[in-house]
Image (tube, rainbow, N blue to C red):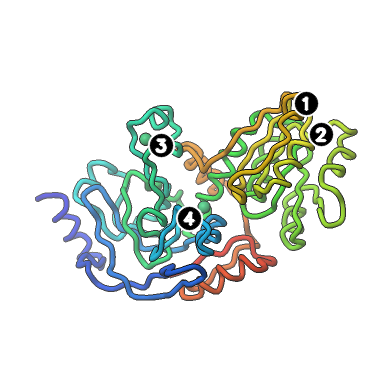
């Protein structure tokens, strides 16, 4: 009996729905600042794909700019959502051979970056830099829906005992794992992070996990700065003190060994250069402004290395899941769970005034 038929039978026996084509609820971004909960056809699994019933799906900062219409990557109408975990409810006929570890009912998260596997970056394990990469929730329907389909090769099983609330954090944690990897050896070194959004807070934890001495973190939003303080960062409030002066003063004028810009404006990029010591390292992660002037002469005279950090390698993604499983990284108690239908409200809230919420997880 072909595996597909066996699966269909097994699925029926244990109560999974295999007849697709039914309607599901999905949060559809229809135009700038317009998101509507509506009925969409349920997805089906192509031969090498799985269908996942979404448990939790996080709202990402990049989706906020997409929602505002500031992002060429995302074109309406679109179901966004690339930070998620859920339960496998269907498998394409090739999946049992491709991924024998996947099964109906298994809890998984997915690396949302599809890659070709053949190009030069892919061969080097840098699949996030694949020339033909595609993002779930941008190039194909994402996780702000009851179900989504995706290539099985992107799935990772959640470790025993992990729920989808924690599993959905793998993607943003993966970004921080990549940032910390590019930061290199930080043990006993002082570091600076500008921006205490989810990526800033997760990077703070990664640097501390890797043995950094002091991690200064600058953030205007008081509630977010308070989170950074709880997580062991040394808080800098830029509306009260000059970020660069505060760092230089605390480091006897030397500056930090590693700075991370998790905002991405002309100002924060300049501040990172000015706060980094000679032969230090600057990780550029924030994408707020597409291009901006940088004090290049200072970088030359200080031999400062600047490097961009984009998403995560598959190895970073797997490591993120491990770290979450080990309880080494967290965003609790600043996670807010909201019904999928309230997604539009939460997009607005995160844009206007996030307050004491770091990550919103939508629950279909
Ligand atoms: Zn994201
Ligand atoms: Zn590739």
Spatial CA distance of label 4 from label 2 is 35 Å
Q: Which mark is drawn over residue 83?
A: 4
Mark 3 or 4: in front is 3
Spatial CA distance of label 3 from label 2 is 35 Å
Which residue corresponds to the image point at 57% horizontal and 57% vertical from the top-left?
61
Q: Ligand 2 closer than 8 Å to the CB at disc 3?
A: yes
Look at the numbered discs 3 and 4 and tell me whether their residues touch, using CB distance below 8 Å.
no
Spatial CA distance of label 1 from label 2 is 8 Å
Q: Which mark is drawn over residue 255?
A: 2
Which residue corresponds to the image point at 39% horizontal and 32% vertical from the top-left?
122
Task: Report which residue position mark 1 lands on.
Answer: 278
**Image-based side of 290 in relation to 150, left or right:** right
Q: If you read the primary sequence from the N terminus, does the residue marked by circle 4 or circle 2 appear first?
A: 4
Q: Quadrant of residue 220?
A: bottom right
Give the mark count.
Answer: 4
Measured as percent of width and height from the top left, residue 303 is found at 72, 24
**Image-based side of 47 in relation to 55, left or right:** left
**Mark 1 neighbour class, 10 Å CA radius: few under 14, some 14 to 19, many 20 or more:** some
Task: Name the secondary structure under disc 2.
Answer: loop
Mark 4 or 2: in front is 2
Q: Ligand 1 closer than 8 Å to the CB at disc 4?
A: yes
**Mark 4 neighbour class, 10 Å CA radius: few under 14, some 14 to 19, many 20 or more:** many
Measured as percent of width and height from the top left, residue 10 is found at 20, 59
Q: If you read the primary sequence from the N terminus, does the residue marked by circle 1 or circle 3 appear first?
A: 3
Q: Which mark is drawn over residue 94?
A: none
Given the current orientation, which residue lies at the most extreme left position? 1
Look at the numbered discs 1 and 2 and tell me whether their residues touch, using CB distance below 8 Å.
yes
Q: Which mark is drawn over residue 130?
A: 3
Look at the numbered discs 1 and 3 and tell me whether their residues touch, using CB distance below 8 Å.
no
Spatial CA distance of label 3 from label 4 is 19 Å
Look at the numbered discs 3 and 2 and tell me whether their residues touch, using CB distance below 8 Å.
no
């Amino acid at each position: 009996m072909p595996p597909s038929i066996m699966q269909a039978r097994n699925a029926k026996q244990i109560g999974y729905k295999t007849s697709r084509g039914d309607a599901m609820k999905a949060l559809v971004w229809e135009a700038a600042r317009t998101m509507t909960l509506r009925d969409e056809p349920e997805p089906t699994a192509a031969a090498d794909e799985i269908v996942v019933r979404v448990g939790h799906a996080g709202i990402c900062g990049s989706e906020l700019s997409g929602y505002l219409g500031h992002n060429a990557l995302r074109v309406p109408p679109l179901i966004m959502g690339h930070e998620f975990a859920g339960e496998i409810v269907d498998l394409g006929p090739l999946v049992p051979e491709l991924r024998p570890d996947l099964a109906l009912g298994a809890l998984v998260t997915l690396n949302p970056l599809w890659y070709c596997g053949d190009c030069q970056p892919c061969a080097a394990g840098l699949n996030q830099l694949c020339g033909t990469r595609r993002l779930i929730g941008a190039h194909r329907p994402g996780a702000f829906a009851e179900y989504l389909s995706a290539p099985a090769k992107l799935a990772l099983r959640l470790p025993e005992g992990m729920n989808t609330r924690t599993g959905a954090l793998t993607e943003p944690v993966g970004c921080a794992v990549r940032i910390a990897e590019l930061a290199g050896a930080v043990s006993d070194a002082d570091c600076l992070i500008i921006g205490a959004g989810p990526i800033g807070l997760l990077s703070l934890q990664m640097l501390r996990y890797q043995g950094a001495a002091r991690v200064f973190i600058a953030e205007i939003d008081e509630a977010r700065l308070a989170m950074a303080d709880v997580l062991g960062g040394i808080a800098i409030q830029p509306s009260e003190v000059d970020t660069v002066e505060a760092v230089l003063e605390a480091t006897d004028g030397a500056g930090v060994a590693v700075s991370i810009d998790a905002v991405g404006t002309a100002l924060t990029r300049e501040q990172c250069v000015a706060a980094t010591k000679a032969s230090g390292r600057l990780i550029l992660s924030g994408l707020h402004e597409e291009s901006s002037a940088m004090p290049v002469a200072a970088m030359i005279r200080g031999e400062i290395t600047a490097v961009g950090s984009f998403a995560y390698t598959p190895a970073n993604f797997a490591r993120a899941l491990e770290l979450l499983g080990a309880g080494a990284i967290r965003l609790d108690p600043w996670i807010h769970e909201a019904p999928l239908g309230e997604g539009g409200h939460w997009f607005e809230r995160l844009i206007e005034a996030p307050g004491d919420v770091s990550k919103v997880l939508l629950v279909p």
